[in-house]
Image (spheres, rainbow, N blue to C red):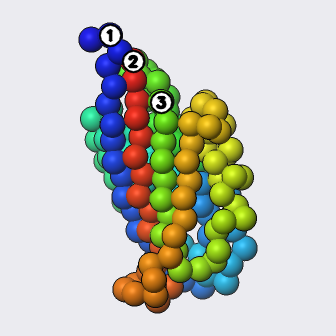
Amino acid sequence: MKGEMRVGYGYDLHRLVQGHRLLLCGLEIEHEKGSAGHSDADVALHALIDALLGAAALGDIGRLFPDTDPQYKDADSIELLRQVVQLITDNGWQVGNVDITIIAERPRLAPHINTMRSKVAENLGILIEQVSVKAKTNERVDAIGREEAIAAHAIALINR
Ligand code: MG
């Protein structure tokens, strides 16, 4: 079908703990806590990867990069993203646009939004205008509001 479009959605959450780095969209952000996980725990890229895989109906991040597999210990999520872009490209798709929402009580992410957008755009092979990154707090409620966790949602449109 010519002009075929698909949309996909992704969600991820990681615990925030001391002694870990905080990586969001491949950018290391200075903070007293970081996200814990088997890989580098980049919650924004994990949501984005699941959105891309979901759009192409090619599974999910846990199936492609199992956290039981030692080769993904401390894995660079930018590298995982690049592999997923290659996979969806191999399946005949190109990325139209993506929209990511990060939910964190702290730190304030507004100063980093454009750097995150350009990092994502560069690794997806699209323009910064095709990448939206938004940040919000959780109004001090629940685990995110208590700064025990950080979460992200993403949607991606792909076409061929
Ligand atoms: Mg994750």
**Relative horizontal placement of residue 132, taking residue 110 as reference (left or right):** left
> SS for tag 1?
loop
Toward the viewer: 22 or 106? Answer: 106
Between marks 2 and 1, how big is the CA–CA gap? 7 Å
Residue denoted by label 3: 96
Between marks 3 and 1, how big is the CA–CA gap? 15 Å
Among the two numbered marks 3 and 1 on one chain, the one whose residue lies closer to the N terminus: 1
Name the spot of residue 121 as percent of width and height, x first: 62, 39
Residue denoted by label 2: 160
Q: Residue at x 71, y 52 (%)?
A: 115
Say if residue 39 shows up in the picture: no
**Relative horizontal placement of residue 31, taking residue 15 as reference (left or right):** right
Identify whether 135 is placed above or below 84.
below
Name the spot of residue 120 as percent of width and height, x first: 61, 44
User: What is the three-letter code of the residue carrying label 1?
Assistant: Lys
User: What is the three-letter code of the residue carrying label 2?
Assistant: Arg
| Circle 3 crowding by C-alpha within 10 Å: few under 14, some 14–19, many from 20 | some
Identify whether 114 is placed above or below 32.
above
Q: Residue at x 59, y 61 (%)?
A: 24
| Circle 2 crowding by C-alpha within 10 Å: few under 14, some 14–19, many from 20 | some
Residue denoted by label 1: 2
